[in-house]
Image (cartoon, grey):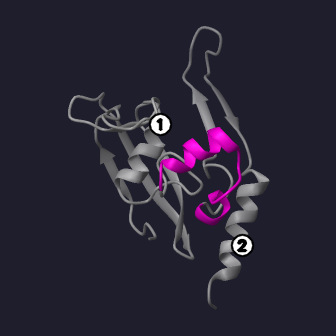
Amino acid sequence: GELREPVDVDAPIGKHPTSEIRVRRAITVDGQAAFTRFVPLETCAGYSFVRVEPKTGRLHQIRVHAAHIGHPVAGDKIYGPDEALFLEFIRDGFTGRLPEQLPIRRQALHCERVTFLPAKLWPDGLSFCAPLADDMARFWKTLRNKEPL
């Protein structure tokens, strides 16, 4: 479904207790503190285009928190519809049922801006910005074209 209101997720992240994927993380009672804000910018065809504001930096934090609130990142093979997709991808590449299960070949995550706080080398701080990747822009445009007028 679509995310229509901002959501704050304050949920600790740790190693997934049962997954055979070693790097998979989950919300765990004894995990490290993690906070993420999801701000919807646009919704379309069952998807939401959101600005994500992580306040901490845990492994897979955005993906774990997005899945936790029922809005997994499009194209996510580990935290999306079935973690077996990741195992298939590692074994066989992007073949088989992956195109049927995933709306985009990779995680639809994009870092628009990263800022480094002032430090000795950068007394004023340092920021980098990047435009949305072409494949993600095409994906969103395709969704818009599917929306009824």
Instruction: Check residue 83 for magenta coloring.
Output: yes
Helix, strand or loop at label 2? It is helix
What residue is disc 1 on? Answer: 60
Quadrant of the drawing holding the C terminus: bottom right
What residue is disc 2 on? Answer: 142
| Viewer-closest of 14 and 86 | 86
Instruction: Check residue 42 for magenta coloring.
Output: no
In the rendered image, the vertical position of residue 107 relative to residue 49, given as above or below: above
Helix, strand or loop at label 1? It is loop
Kindly identify the amino acid type of the residue bearing the numbered disc 2: Thr
Residue at the spot 50% in from the left edge and 45% down from the top edge = 78
Q: Residues within 10 Å of mark 2 (few under 14, many from 20)?
A: few
Residue at the spot 75% in from the left edge and 50% down from the top edge = 133
In the visual, does 72 lie left or right of 102?
Answer: left
The magenta span reads 82-101
* Among numbered discs 1 and 2, the one appearing first in the sequence: 1
In the visual, does 147 lie left or right of 136?
Answer: left
Residue 141 in sight here: yes
